[in-house]
C-alpha cells in the first residue's frame, strides 16, 4: 500500500506569491471547480468520448503497468485515474488528488460503479504531496499543472515520490492560436470585462502552451528521456447553443466571467459567440473546434 508520511513531508514555501494571496487563490480555485462538479457529471459521456485520447496517452507515457502504484494529480471527476486503475488491475493501487471535493465525489461514484476498489480519491493541494519518497511507479496529471501557483515546486515533489526509473506524464493546453475551442469565446468575453490582460506567467489555461516550456521544467526537475507531443482533438457540438451550454456549465474559468454579466450583457455575449462560431459550423449545423495540447513525459533518473 502507498505510505502516507504526513509528519515527514517536505514543506516548500511558494516565494513568488504571499501566503495570504496563495490561500485566497486556492480557495477561489476550490470554489470555482466545486461549482461545476454537477455539470461535469452530466457531461461525463461527452467528456469521456472527447478526452479519452489524453487518458490513454498519459497512462501509456507514464508507464502504468499491471500491479503498479499510480498517483494522479488534478483528478477532477476521475481522469485519468480511473483509466490507470483499469490498467493496473486489482493488484495495483491508484491515488487521485484534487482540490475540489465535489469533483472527487463524482470520481468516487464512477469508480464504485466500475468496481474499482483499488482506487482512492483525496482532497489535497498538490504543492506538497503527503507521501514518502519513491511511493509510486507512475504519476499522471491531465490539464492541472498550468493552474498551479508554483508548478516547479510541484514537479520537484512529483520527482520525489516517484521510484527511480518511474515515469511521469502530463498534458497542458497548447498555444491560444491552436485552441479555437477556447479562444472563440474568450475573445468575445474580453469585450465584456474591464480586467487587464492575463499575465502569461501567472496561473492560467495557456500558461505552459509554448513548445519546450514544460519539457525544460521536467529536465530541471531531474527527469530524463523527456518527450513532448502535440495532440489535437476535435470538440464536436450539435449546435452553437450546445457549445454555449457546455461553456456556461462546465468551463470553470469562463463560468466565473459569465456569472458576473447582467442578463442583457449575457444575451449579447451569447449572440457574439454564436457569430464567432459560424466559421466552424458545418452544413449540418454542427460545430467542430480544434483543441490542441502538449503531452510531456519523462523518466525519473535513468530508465
Image (spheres, helix red, strand yellow):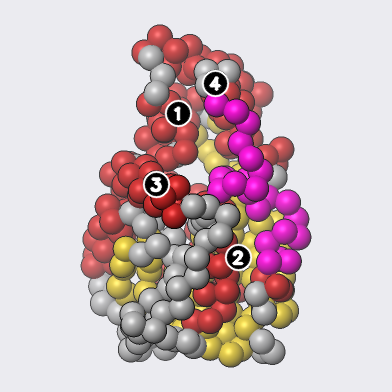
Q: Is residue 285 above or below residue 47?
A: above
Q: Is residue 87 visible?
A: no
Residue 230 quadrant: bottom right
Disc 3 target residue: 24
- Span of residues in magenta: 195-217
Which of marks 2 and 1 precedes in the sequence?
2
Which of pointers 4 and 3 lies earlier in the amino acid sequence?
Answer: 3
Instruction: Report the residue marked by disc 1.
Output: 257
Give the distance between the C-alpha atoms of the residues marked 1 and 3, in whole angstroms. Answer: 18 Å
Q: Secondary structure at mark 2?
A: helix
Residue 20 rendering spot, x and y as whole percentages: 41, 50
The answer for how far apart the CA atoms under marks 4 and 3 are is: 21 Å
| Percent coordinates x, y for residue 217 in the rendering | 68, 66
| Residue at the spot 64% in from the left edge and 62% down from the top edge | 295
Question: How far is disc 2 from disc 4 in space, using C-alphas?
Answer: 31 Å
Marks 4 and 3 close (CB-CB < 8 Å): no
Q: Which residue is mark 4?
A: 194
Residue at 53% in and 67% down: 154
How packed mark 2 is, by other alpha carbons closer than 10 Å (few <14, some 14-19, many 20 or more), is some
Along the horizontal axis of the image, is 33 left or right of 10? left
Earlier in the chain: of badge 4 and badge 1, it is 4
Mark 1 vs mark 2: give the one in front: 2
Q: Position of residue 163 (x, y in %)?
A: 53, 88
Q: Main secondary structure of the magenta part?
A: loop
Task: Find residue 152 and name its label.
Answer: 2
Q: Secondary structure at mark 3?
A: helix
Q: Residue 109 versus residue 1: which sits nearer the camera?
A: 1
Amino acid at each position: 500500500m502507498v505510505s502516507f508520511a504526513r509528519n515527514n513531508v517536505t514543506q516548500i514555501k511558494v516565494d513568488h506569491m504571499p501566503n495570504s494571496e496563495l490561500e485566497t487563490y486556492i480557495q477561489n480555485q476550490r470554489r470555482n471547480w466545486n461549482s461545476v462538479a454537477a455539470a461535469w457529471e452530466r457531461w461525463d459521456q461527452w467528456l469521456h468520448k472527447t478526452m479519452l485520447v489524453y487518458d490513454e496517452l498519459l497512462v501509456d507515457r507514464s508507464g502504468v503497468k499491471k500491479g503498479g502504484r499510480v498517483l494522479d494529480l488534478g483528478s477532477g471527476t476521475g481522469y485519468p485515474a480511473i483509466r490507470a486503475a483499469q490498467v493496473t488491475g486489482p493488484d495495483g493501487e491508484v491515488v487521485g488528488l484534487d482540490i475540489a471535493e465535489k469533483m472527487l465525489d463524482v470520481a468516487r461514484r464512477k469508480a464504485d460503479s466500475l468496481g474499482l476498489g483499488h482506487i482512492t480519491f483525496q482532497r489535497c493541494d498538490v504543492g506538497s504531496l503527503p507521501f514518502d519518497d519513491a511511493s509510486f511507479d507512475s504519476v499522471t496529471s491531465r490539464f492541472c499543472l498550468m493552474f498551479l501557483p508554483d508548478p516547479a515546486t510541484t514537479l520537484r515533489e512529483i520527482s520525489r515520490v516517484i521510484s527511480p526509473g518511474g515515469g511521469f506524464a502530463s498534458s497542458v493546453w497548447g498555444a491560444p492560436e491552436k485552441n479555437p475551442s477556447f479562444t472563440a469565446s474568450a475573445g468575445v468575453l474580453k469585450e465584456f470585462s474591464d480586467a487587464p490582460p492575463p499575465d502569461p506567467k501567472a496561473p492560467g489555461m495557456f500558461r505552459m502552451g509554448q513548445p519546450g516550456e514544460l519539457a525544460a521544467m521536467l529536465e530541471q526537475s531531474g527527469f530524463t528521456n523527456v518527450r513532448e507531443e502535440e495532440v489535437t482533438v476535435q470538440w464536436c457540438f450539435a449546435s452553437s447553443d450546445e457549445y454555449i451550454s457546455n461553456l456556461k456549465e462546465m468551463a470553470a474559468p469562463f463560468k466565473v466571467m459569465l456569472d458576473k454579466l447582467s442578463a442583457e450583457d449575457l444575451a449579447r455575449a451569447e449572440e457574439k459567440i454564436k457569430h464567432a462560431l459560424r466559421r466552424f459550423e458545418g452544413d449540418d449545423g454542427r460545430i467542430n473546434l480544434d483543441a490542441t495540447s502538449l503531452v510531456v513525459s519523462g523518466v525519473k533518473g535513468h530508465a
